[in-house]
Image: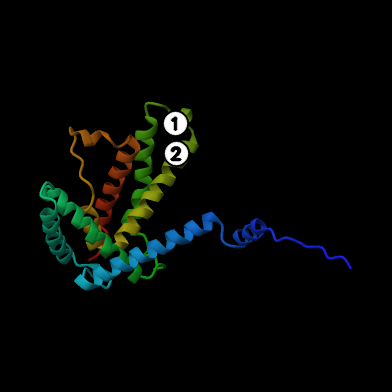
Amino acid sequence: MSFHSRSTSWSMVLSGIRNSGPSKAEFNAAMLAESAAKLDAGRVQIAAKHGLVTGSTFNVSTIMACAIVEARKHRRNDPALTWGAALSRALRFFWACATTARRLAVPAVAPVAPMPAALRRGVLARAWELFRSSFNYPRVPFRSIGRDCFTWAFRKAWAEARETARLAGLGIEALKAAEAIEPRVRVGLSTSYTDSIHQVAARNDAVRLRAAAMAYATA
């Protein structure tokens, strides 16, 4: 009787183990999701400890008080840091904690409030305003521009109205909070030229829509 020896290929075994497990992309996605969950949990814990949020309402005075205390710590640890930079860093941190706590406390799917009648009536006027400013109407005749361009302006006006209604549903406190942490850019400084024209336009649109939403928001 003859015996045939068979050697085990460990490279094939290790390759099989790797292939049976998650891919690199799946592993990285799982790690990112875990890190995000831990970050959210830590922020919620800080928000609960300091009382940054009550139900779905931001406690603005508490957030500001915590930020001032934290900014003083930053200044002690780094004397070269200006008070404005220290307060901005601390304020952004506590607003992030409060926003996370509010987001996780409020149900993700909430009933959408009907669009205010005054906002709905202004859609057509806004569409004509966009049409004139974007396509130089009436200097350029309507027949030269075409209906598709007005359709674009009309859709954009409806999108702005829906976004205004959504922002108004967040409440006045949330809108004030968003306004408080909006970065201020002073024209003339070197930092005022770092943003592209699209970023500047998007920021201006966001500020304009928040201001319009304030007229329809409730406390």
Instruction: Give whichever of discs 2 and 1 has the lower sequence position.
Output: 1
**Does residue 15 appear left or right of residue 146 in this picture?**
right
Amino acid type, residue under disc 1 in the picture: Phe
Identify which residue is drawn at 13% across, 55% down: 77
Identify which residue is drawn at 47% across, 27% down: 144
Q: Nearer the viewer, residue 70 or 51?
A: 70
Vertical relation: 86 (above or below) 135: below
The residue under label 1 is 142
Name the residue at the right extreme: 1
Vertical relation: 189 (above or below) 214: above
Q: CA distance from mark 2 to mark 1?
A: 9 Å
**What percent of the width, then of the height, locates residue 172?**
23, 61
Q: Which mark is residue 150?
A: 2
State if disc 1 and disc 2 touch (CB < 8 Å).
Answer: yes
**Does residue 42 appear left or right of residue 142 in this picture?**
left
Q: Nearer the viewer, residue 35 or 19?
A: 19
